[in-house]
């Protein structure tokens, strides 16, 4: 593990990504004049957010849009790019764990990212990932 990203930059990226997803979803709701109280609309909002956090890093070498802006990315423990299975474990299974513990595991995970030397939270341990400032290998060769 090299060039590990810390708590604050990771939190900033998650908040920025949340704002981005919220703006896109909010715009769609406004343009399509959808009922935000509808269970279908609320489920669609959740699915869109989950798809963003699972799929975007798979296609963008571990980056989400905010992570790219802040120059951090998710990688496997060996430094290789994340795949679909890894991101499902990290986001879906990790998110499920945070939900069923009523957020307690999320708080524990935040402390882990803030205090552990390797800066890995529960979701990172589940998926075998960490967050780094290192760029993808093929980008380094082009620089």
Image (spheres, rainbow, N blue to C red):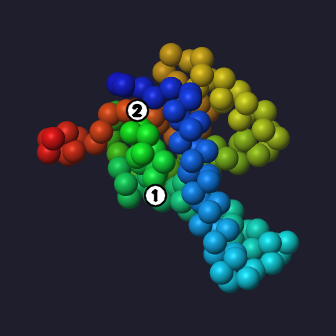
Observer able to see residue 77: no
Report the residue marked by disc 2.
Answer: 132
| Left or right of 116 on screen, residue 43 | right
Residue 97 location (% of width, % of height): 71, 42
Q: Which mark is residue 67?
A: none
In this view, the residue farthest toward the left is 142
Report the residue at 57% width, 47% height from top: 16
Q: Is residue 130 above or below residue 17?
A: above
| Left or right of 126 on screen, residue 141 | left
Report the residue at 62% width, 52% height from top: 18
Q: Earlier in the sequence, mark 2 or mark 1?
A: 1
| Left or right of 74 on screen, residue 93 | right
Report the residue marked by disc 1.
Answer: 56
Q: Is residue 128 above or below residue 26?
A: above
In this view, the residue farthest toward the right is 37
Give 87 or 36, whichever is nearer the viewer: 36
Report the residue at 78% width, 38% height from top: 103
Report the residue at 45% width, 29% height from top: 5
CA separation in Å, label 2 and label 1? 17 Å
Give 54 or 97, whichever is nearer the viewer: 54
Helix, strand, or loop for circle 1? Answer: helix
Observer able to see residue 114: yes
């Amino acid at each position: 593990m090299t060039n590990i990203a810390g708590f604050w930059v990771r939190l900033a990226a998650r908040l920025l990504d949340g704002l981005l997803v919220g703006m896109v979803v909010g715009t769609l709701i406004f343009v399509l004049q959808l009922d935000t109280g509808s269970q279908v609309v609320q489920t669609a909002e959740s699915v869109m957010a989950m798809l963003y956090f699972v799929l975007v890093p798979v296609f963008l070498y571990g980056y989400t849009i905010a992570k790219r802006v802040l120059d951090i990315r998710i990688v496997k423990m060996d430094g290789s790019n994340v795949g679909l299975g890894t991101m499902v474990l990290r986001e879906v299974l990790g998110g499920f764990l945070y939900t069923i513990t009523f957020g307690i595991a999320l708080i524990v995970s935040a402390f882990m990212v803030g205090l552990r030397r390797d800066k890995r939270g529960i979701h990172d341990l589940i998926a075998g990932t960490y967050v780094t400032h290192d760029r993808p290998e093929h980008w380094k060769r082009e620089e």
